[in-house]
Amino acid sequence: MTRAASKSVLVTGASSGIGRATALRLAAEGMQVFAACRKASDGEALASEAKPGTLTPVLMDVTSADSIAACRERIAAAADGGLDGLVNNAGVGTSGPMEALPLDTVRAAFEVNLFGQLAVIQAFLPLLHPRRGRIVNLGSVGARITIPFGGVLCGSKAAFESFSDALRLELHPLGLHVSIIRPGSIHTPAVAKTLGGVDEAIAGWPEAARTRYGAMFRSFTARAVAREEAGSPPEVVAEAILHALTAATPRTRYAVGKDARALSLLPRLLPDGLLDRIRLKMLGLPTAFGPAARSGEEETAASGGAAMGR
Ligand SMILES: NC(=O)c1ccc[n+]([C@@H]2O[C@H](COP(=O)([O-])OP(=O)(O)OC[C@H]3O[C@@H](n4cnc5c(N)ncnc54)[C@H](OP(=O)(O)O)[C@@H]3O)[C@@H](O)[C@H]2O)c1
């Protein structure tokens, strides 16, 4: 392990969940932690929980170039021009059927989960290079195993993992490590943000989509919420991030939390057909081919065919 104390690390999305647990864990280790939040009040609340002088709240919205630049200026001045670690944790979840999700919603999720991450990496690499700092990126098991109604989240994480792989290879000759953290089910406030408000979400879809996917989406959401609520605490992810930042030989990938290893492994072992049935069954969706189309047609007929008028 390299010495944790005296290292300076920036953690994005530190207001809640994994980012919050990570910022506090790294501060407890004696690191100089810059905890990036979008709201000043969140940063102040976090700082009040850490050992005095170890955690500095900073403001950053990863979708705003100005906000990223202002944050970099602040950290460059405070951290003596260099950073030993960057934890790209900020992220949003979005769920819904690919057929009905508004493209603006999809773009907004990719703006945070993919483009925002790269913008932060590009902005802070000049501070990481002089110290051969480490980058730790929050991926997801969803990057490995896509679930129905999770296409946007899983797709953005798969793309981010691919960016991370390219970055790792490019930075390897320059002496900088890049690790990907792949959490499984972790119980954080993200569950309510991503999977809460089912009725409102369905109400926002075109009528035909409500008929086709409404019942399946409700079933999916109930199962997904139960899985996440029974998930591991965010502190287990914070431990993996600490390892990635301090181990003499950090791993390229860390599967952490409930189901993470199994879900990462299954797609490598099982054929698509079997894996599809397992995923559908796990999320309470029909495993047979077509039954939801028949029930959709019945509902459409019962509502006088209005559902087809999308
Ligand atoms: N929980 C899980 O089971 C799980 C599984 C796999 C991967 N992950 C990944 O782990 C990371 C943390 O997730 P979590 O469960 O801890 O979620 P969370 O509790 O919802 O925290 C997400 C953090 O990201 C911040 N954020 C959102 N949009 C942002 C933006 N535009 N700019 C800057 N910060 C922004 C949030 O800030 P605000 O409070 O201001 O919104 C919050 O601090 C995410 O990348 C997530 O995809 C989580």
Image (tube, rainbow, N blue to C red):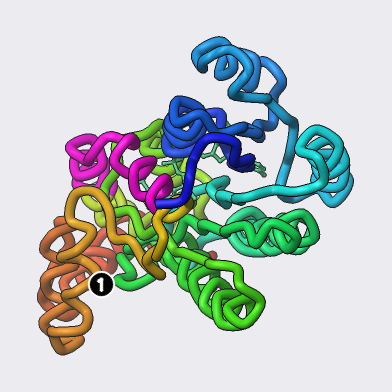
**293 on left or right of 204:** left
Q: Quadrant of residue 213?
A: bottom left
Question: Mostly what secondary structure, the magenta segment?
Answer: helix
**201 on left or right of 293:** right
What segment is highlighted magenta in the picture? 221-243
Residue 103, how many percent across, how many down?
63, 64
Q: Residue at x 16, y 72 (%)?
A: 291
Q: Residue at x 41, y 60 (%)?
A: 248
Residue 53, how many percent across, how many down?
63, 17
60 or 224, which lies in front?
A: 60
**66 on left or right of 241:** right
Residue where numbered disc 1 is placed: 293
Asked if residue 57 can be seen in this view, the reply is yes
305 or 170, which lies in front?
A: 170
Queried on whether the Cβ of the residue with tag 1 lies below 8 angstroms from ligand 1, the answer reads no
Q: Is residue 142 above or below residue 210?
A: below
Q: Is residue 207 above or below residue 67?
A: below
Q: Quadrant of the C terminus?
A: bottom right
66 or 88, which lies in front?
A: 88
- Judge whether residue 240 is colored magenta: yes
Q: Residue at x 19, y 47 (%)?
A: 223
Q: What is the total number of numbered labels drawn onto the structure image?
A: 1
How packed is label 1: few (under 14 Cα within 10 Å), some, or many (20 or more)? few
Q: Is residue 183 above or below residue 265?
A: above
